[in-house]
Amino acid sequence: MKITIHRGTDQIGGCVTEYEHEGWRLFVDYGEELPGSPKTGELQVDGLTHGDLSKSALLITHYHGDHIGSITKLPEALPIYMGEVAREIQLVLSNHLKTVFPAHKEMVKLLQKVHTFKAGIDFTFGPFNIIPVTVDHSAFDAYAFRIEASGVSAYHTGDFRLHGFRSSNFFKMLEQYVGKVDYVVCEATNILRPNATSKKESALQRELESLFKEKKSTVVYLSSTNIDRLFSLYHAALKAGRPFYVDKYQKDIMDVVVNSKSMWTKSSLYRYGKYEPETLMYHQFDKNRFFVSDSFKEFLDKKGYVIIARSNERFEDLLEQIPGEKQKVLSMWNGYVKEGTEAYNENLANSLNDEYDYMHTSGHIDMKDLREFFHQLQPKAIIPIHTDSPDEFAKEFSDEWQVIRLYDGQSITLTSIYGVDLCGTKI
């Protein structure tokens, strides 16, 4: 089985990985490159972007833009597979954005034809046997894949972590569905960010609950598709006795999860409590504004609130009209508000105005947990992707495992015997 990393060996996001065997090609993810990353331009990959597609397919790990955002550029004949709930969440997102971004109009059409899979239920494509393994990430219904062909097995991690709400049974699932594997193609987002995962999601939720009890009026900025955080905030507000407000788009996303048949929705975290989230109403004569009545303002003044906001004029207008000394919270990566960086979001920075609490934890695994993960799988070798420092990753883990440092476009042939062939050289 041959692996080619077409993009993602030295950047976070935009990863494209190919598994090839006997002329059959299985690709994993085809997303957008992140702001600030080195731009590689449009990829030209035989069997993916052009050429004979009769023996090609694409697997999507999750719905974040750096993993799925470019699939509308691919030929219509290419079969695409993703999780059932992830597909529904992406539909809500794309329907929300399609009037502003034409690519999302195309995404809505494409998603109608996407094939779906379920966690733990294997399927085949040509010589490949594929087991989707559900993982904990800041995207709901995210997956890793165990991919096997002719006795050679690889585990493609996608993005994942072990400090979230859904991590407690992860090693049991690995034992049941994955076992030992020959190779791991592994995300390494946090190799240079040792403090990014210093807090568990459960601990963060307790801190948020305490804040909501202390502060009568709180406005939280976060990614609307960070499902775990969204539901965590909702339950923290419920326990604190504060009304919880979202707009229709955010409520639609929450409803998709609550009404899904995902194995995770057995948890009370993904179910509504005594009161559902309140939906902010649009103004009858101006859809670019929310309707704010005197009775609504009186209710907020009496009860307080937690509002999930975004940095746009509609929410700015709302916050100007409603009462209360507002405590603002940033619950997403703070790189978006650091001026001078490529990821800087001026609108978000202006909305926060340097007066906010930073309450966040990463959606990606830390290196201590990653070492435990490798001990479980016992791979012959590890190939880092989705990282801006593969060399640091090699330094971190080469004491116990062979770490293969590839470059974009480079291929490697994997065998069931210890050792691999890299560009004709034994390593």
Image: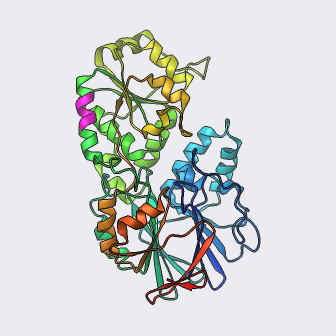
Q: In terms of depth relative to the viewer, which is nearer, 297 or 104?
A: 104
Say if 147 sits above or below 272 in the image.
Answer: below
Task: Kindly tell me whether residue 161 is visible in this rendering.
Answer: yes
Up-down relation of residue 106 to residue 154 (above or below): above
Which residue: 55% across, 44% down? 92
User: Magenta segment range?
Assistant: 207-211
Q: Residue at x 28, y 63 (%)?
A: 169
Instruction: Considering the whole magenta stretch, tell me its main secondary structure.
Output: helix
Q: Position of residue 284 (x, y in %)?
A: 58, 19
Please state which of residues 265 and 187 is positioned toward the viewer in this rendering. 187
Q: Quadrant of residue 170?
A: bottom left
Would you say residue 239 is visible in this rendering? no
Q: Residue 224 location, x and y as percent?
A: 47, 39
Q: Nearer the viewer, residue 57 or 159?
A: 159
Q: Position of residue 361 (x, y in %)?
A: 35, 44
Judged from this view, the residue extending furthest toward the right is 51
Coloured how? rainbow
Q: Give the left or right position of residue 342, taking residue 100 as reference.
A: left
Viewport quadrant of the N terminus: bottom right
Instruction: Tell me if 78 is positioned left or right of 135 in this view.
Output: right
Q: Which x, y percent locates residue 250?
A: 48, 37
> Is residue 278 depicted above or below 420 in this figure?
above
Q: Is residue 387 magenta?
A: no
Residue 46 or 111: which is nearer the viewer? 46
Q: Which residue is located at x 37 percent, y 60 percent?
A: 263
Q: Quadrant of residue 142?
A: bottom left
